Image (cartoon, helix red, strand yellow):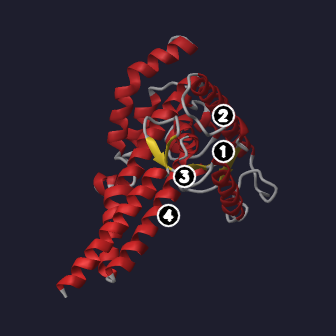
């Protein structure tokens, strides 16, 4: 029995070593971050998956894609909101292209080609305060976020896009995920964890060992990386915000306000896929002196 246990232990160690090697050979510099990322997918594959998912999401909204062909209740105010989203999106797109080209010229290894993304910006009628950007530049903003980024008076009106800086913070953050290939990295990490679970399950012959590995990987690898993705997207999004001449000081104010949504009922940060809203606001305040200096260099003095 002891020999059997020893043999299984060797097999488990061999499986872990093989997993570590596979992880290492699939890491590469992406350019938007200061680290190497695990990627088993290409930019083209990620964009194709993004396009497919975007079509499915919009199709599933049952006529709630504002001012689309299937929307028969598009109001004049909604047209104003959609136009604002697309104008902000256009500005952020140009900022992303400019930023990427500067990185490439300076020798930074950037694979993503923002100029080649099939950029699309849509507004979805929903009370959900959310937005996303899928790989390939497929952006959707849910109308529930607009009052939060607007005048926060509990009503959704065209007045909510009079000052567009906070909405630009949200959209810039989501676009940053696509630029930094976070979606591809999450898919790649998930694939490697699944391979590891299968290998360890086969080596150990014990389902409990496989489950323990999955739990450990979730808490020790996937959740911390998800939080890192959010922090990286905040930093890259701030760069896009400044390059588009939106007031960067609105970023920490937005996240402090977001922290009050839902009465503060959130899981502890170490068990969450996102940093806490206060942590994010604190990060923005730490980055703010540099952001303000860059803004005023590009766009002129900020207004009080």
Q: Is residue 177 above or below residue 104?
A: below
Q: Earlier in the sequence, mark 2 or mark 3?
A: 2
In the structure shown, which secondary structural element does the residue marked by tag 4 occupy?
helix
Q: Residue at x 28, y 72 (%)?
A: 10
Disc 4 from disc 3: Cα separation: 12 Å
Residue closer to the observer: 84 or 187: 187
Dot in front, 4 or 2: 4
Q: Which residue is mark 1?
A: 137
Disc 4 from disc 2: Cα separation: 30 Å
Q: Is residue 195 above or below residue 77?
A: below
In the structure shown, which secondary structural element does the residue marked by tag 3 occupy?
helix
Q: Earlier in the sequence, mark 4 or mark 2?
A: 2
Dot in front, 2 or 3: 3
Q: Is residue 18 above or below residue 42?
A: below
Disc 1 from disc 2: Cα separation: 9 Å
Q: Which residue is mark 2?
A: 93
Q: Which residue is mark 3?
A: 183
In the structure shown, which secondary structural element does the residue marked by tag 1 occupy?
loop
Q: Earlier in the sequence, mark 4 or mark 3?
A: 3
From the viewer's perspective, tell me whether residue 294 is left or right of residue 286.
right
Q: Residue at x 67, y 41 (%)?
A: 81
Residue projecting furthest to the left = 2
From the viewer's perspective, tell me whether residue 76 is left or right of residue 197.
right
Check whether the beta carbons of the residues at disc 2 and disc 3 lie within 8 A of each other. Answer: no
Q: Which residue is mark 4?
A: 191
Q: Quick one: label 4, few (<14), some, or many (20+) residues within 10 Å?
A: few
Q: Earlier in the sequence, mark 1 or mark 2?
A: 2
Check whether the beta carbons of the residues at disc 4 and disc 3 lie within 8 A of each other. Answer: no
Residue closer to the observer: 261 or 204: 204
């Amino acid at each position: 029995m002891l020999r059997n246990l020893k043999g299984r232990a060797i097999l488990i160690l061999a499986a872990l070593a093989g997993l570590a090697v596979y992880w290492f050979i699939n890491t590469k510099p992406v350019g938007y971050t200061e680290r190497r990322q695990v990627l088993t997918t290409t930019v083209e594959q990620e964009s194709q998956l993004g396009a497919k998912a975007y079509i499915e999401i919009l199709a599933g909204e049952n006529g709630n894609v504002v001012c689309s062909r299937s929307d028969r209740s598009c109001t004049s105010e909604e047209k104003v909101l959609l136009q604002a989203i697309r104008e902000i999106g256009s500005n952020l797109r140009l900022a992303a292209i400019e930023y990427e080209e500067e990185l490439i010229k300076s020798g930074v290894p950037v694979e993503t080609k923002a100029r080649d993304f099939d950029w699309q910006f849509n507004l979805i009628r929903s009370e959900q305060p959310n937005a996303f950007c899928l790989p390939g530049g497929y952006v959707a903003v849910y109308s529930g976020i607009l009052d939060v980024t607007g005048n926060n008076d509990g009503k959704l009106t065209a007045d909510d896009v009079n000052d567009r800086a906070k909405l630009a913070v949200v959209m810039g953050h989501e676009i940053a995920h696509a630029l930094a290939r976070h979606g591809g990295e999450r898919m790649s990490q998930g694939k490697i964890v699944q391979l590891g679970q299968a290998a360890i399950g086969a080596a150990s012959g014990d389902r409990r060992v496989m489950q323990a590995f999955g739990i450990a990987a979730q808490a020790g690898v996937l959740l911390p990386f998800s939080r890192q993705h959010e922090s990286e997207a905040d930093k890259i999004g701030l760069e896009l915000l400044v390059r588009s001449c939106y007031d960067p000081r609105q970023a920490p104010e937005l996240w402090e306000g977001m922290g009050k949504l839902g009465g503060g009922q959130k899981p502890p940060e170490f068990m969450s896929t996102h940093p806490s809203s206060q942590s994010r606001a604190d990060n923005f305040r730490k980055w703010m002196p540099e952001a303000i200096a860059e803004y005023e260099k590009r766009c002129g003095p900020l207004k009080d």
